[in-house]
Image (cartoon, rainbow, N blue to C red):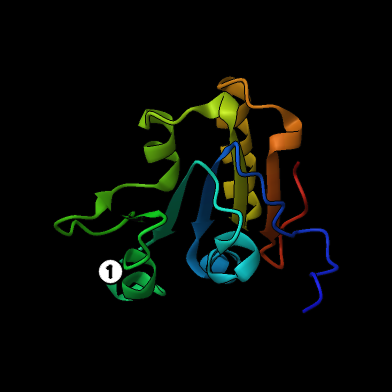
Amino acid sequence: VVRATGSFVLEPKQHRHFVFISMGTGVAPFRSMVLSDLFRKNLPLSTLFLAGFRRSQDILFGEELSDLEYLSWVPALSREDQPGVFAGRVTAYLKAAEIPFELSEFYICGSADLVKEVRAILESKNVAEESIHHEAYLHPNKKKSW
């Protein structure tokens, strides 16, 4: 098995907490990461997987990820209320969550706007730049803003 060679890759750190924050299809690279042998053989102190979707029918990999004992799966729905699911945007959850921010690694995948907003929240929580890893997709009519 060969490691991924792109710039958005998992960097295992057993003595840190991991927080994955995604929106929509941004859940896919994180699914691959948390299911990988590399991750499972080097489990962090804790893993929070926060995934934002508009409606319950949009949730990707929910059953599979919620069954993993080594992570906390938190889907967030921005346009629908469902029992057992956070109602609101992932950024609202992140602002209110009790996370050991300064002891965590953050991986963000979603729109450029999401990445920008999450980075601002993390900076306000004193998260070190080297602990923030991100991949953004752009709307065809937008330019990078970070």
Residue 16 place in picture, x, y as percent: 59, 37
Residue appearing at x 85%, y 68% in the figure: 5
The N terminus, quarter of image:
bottom right
Query: Could you say which is closer to the camera, residue 67 or residue 20?
Result: 67
Lateral position of residue 135 relative to residue 110, left or right: right
Residue appearing at x 41%, y 56% in the figure: 70
Q: Residue furthest bottom?
A: 1
Residue appearing at x 62%, y 20% in the figure: 126
Decide: is 117 above or below 136: above
The C terminus, quarter of image:
top right
Residue 112 place in picture, x, y as percent: 66, 52
Dot 1: element:
helix
Residue appearing at x 83%, y 66% in the figure: 6
Q: Residue 10 sits in which quadrant?
A: bottom right
**Mark 1 residue type:** Ser
Within 10 Å of the Cα at label 1, are there few (<14), some (14-19), or many (20+) other Cα atoms? Answer: some
Decide: is 28 above or below 96: below
Residue 80 visible to an observer of this rendering: yes
Q: Residue furthest front?
A: 41
Lateral position of residue 34 relative to residue 89, left or right: right
| Residue to which mark 1 is pinned | 56
